[in-house]
Image (cartoon, grey):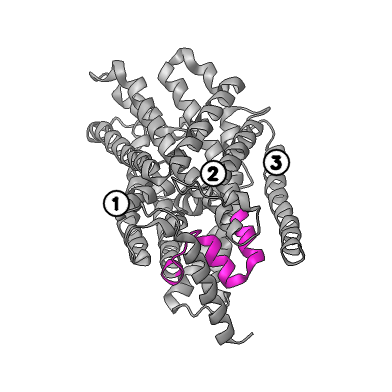
Amino acid sequence: MSDVEVQDRFVEAEHLVEAQSAELKKELRLVDLVLSQTLYIIGIQWLGTAGKLGSAHVMYWIPAVLLFYIPSGIVVIHLSREMPLEGGLYQWAKLRFGEAVGFLVALNLWATVVLVVGSMVSMLTDNIGYAVGPAGAWIVESKLVNATVTAVVMGSMAVIAVRGLSLAKWIHNIGGFVLVLMIVSMLAFALPRWIHGNAAAAPAAVVFPAFTLLNLNIAAKMGFGAFCGFDGTCIFAGEVRDPNVARTLRRSIFLSGPLIAVIYILGTSAVLAFTRPADLDLISPPTQALMRGSQGTPFAFVAAPAIALLLILNGLGGTSLYFNSVIRLPMVAGWDQLLPQWLSRIHPRFRTPVGSIICVAAATFTLTFLGNFGVGAQEAFQLLNSTGLICWALAYLVMFAIPLVGRGEKAPLAVRIAAVSGFVMTLGYAVLSIFPVVEVKNPASFTLKAILVIGGINAAGAVYFRFASRRRHHP
């Protein structure tokens, strides 16, 4: 196929997506995208993961920013400028590598968000336990409580998603604002400890920790794991108010990027002011830090419920954002007739994909319930989070490959260099993340579960795509 034919097909496919997106409501402004970008990328659990490195964490955050975070921003800006389309990375992969690759990318993104939302439910349960106090320790490990919280959260998310971004964006904005507020509060409590020299660990040190598999694993997570997500708001490209969608997406990255990096570095320093690396809570380190920081202050008697409430608001905002992003993927795949049309059916009033919403809510509940079966809370959180992010890594490997080998691509040299750096960092993360960071009952079983989940998702996706393609061409 000639370059001219490739470009003609590209333009035709773009116009089809734009026509389908025309019936969606345009609800998102720049400020919504900035707060959503912050909420989408920052995972508060990474403060605990980085804190495991002790005072040397800053010597891992800086390479993570230089080798992955900035390169991913460069590549996403390049692709969103070329293809500012509803569906984001799914559309980019489909238009440059074909429908088969696009479908598997969408499937991995879908699995990512479903699994990560499941892990966020574990975080919500963890904070309910904190709110109750010492008597609520049993809540965290209770399968019944986890199942109940999952059902309530998924039901609420589904109702909000049906109502649309006109309501959901305010929940996302509150979640992003609460996140910034928590970091500022942690720093306010940590500062006196730093000044008086009684912090549990120094906030930062220009010293690399020993070269071990654990430290290498954590370093990989602090690159891709903590900083992936610039593609997240691009999923909503067809719902941005500004007609110049690419410009608005680019500005949201420029504004949120530095804020996110600062929050990670200062937030990790703050948790180390209160807790030694070995004792960090890997699910909700800010809760642990704020609880200890408030001791001996006038706020101590209300600290537990207030802090837990903030974390719950943040968790609900993040869960809603992830949920609203993932329901767009079955919708846009339905536009391409790769999934049943009922997944793309739009609510006559709210203009939202009701079928996709119900499907994602049911799948998230099922996977979260199964992920908690037979394991502890920390291990369940780690399994859901790790397998979800490895699926995301597979999608990112395709994204970074687009400027390098994508059909019709003529990316500038700086973009291609950024793509190589991002690809290598992502590949390192995908390989290392099948090994657990927390102590688990059976590390080999943990690794096997992760491989089976990821392999099963992609094998099932490949089989289904072949079936769907044949059915579409030979009805």
Q: Image quadrant for the N terminus?
A: bottom right
Point out which mark residue 200 bears: none
Specify whether 147 is left or right of 412: right
Q: Secondary structure at mark 3?
A: helix
Of residues 427 and 146, the one drawn nearer to the viewer in this rendering: 146
Specify whether 195 is left or right of 406: left
Q: Is residue 98 visible?
A: yes
**Residue denoted by label 2:** 354
Q: Are marks 1 and 3 in contact (CB under 8 Å)?
A: no
Magenta segment main secondary structure: helix
Q: Is residue 45 visible?
A: no
Q: Nearer the viewer, mark 2 or mark 1?
A: 2
Seen in the picture, residue 453 relative to 430 is either above or below; the reply is above
Say few, some or many: other residues with alpha carbon within 10 Å of mark 2 (under 14 / 14 to 19 / 20 or more). many
Seen in the picture, residue 128 relative to 27 is either above or below; the reply is above
Instruction: Give the spatial CA distance, label 1 vs label 3.
Output: 40 Å
Q: Amino acid at mark 3?
A: Lys
Q: Residue at x 37, y 57 (%)?
A: 240
Q: Position of residue 251 (x, y in %)?
A: 31, 61
Q: Amino acid at mark 2?
A: Val
**Residue denoted by label 3:** 449
Q: Image quadrant for the C terminus?
A: bottom right
Instruction: Give the spatial CA distance, label 2 vs label 1.
Output: 27 Å
Magenta region: 79-107
**Residue denoted by label 1:** 31
Say few, some or many: other residues with alpha carbon within 10 Å of mark 1 (under 14 / 14 to 19 / 20 or more). some
Q: Quadrant of residue 293?
A: top left
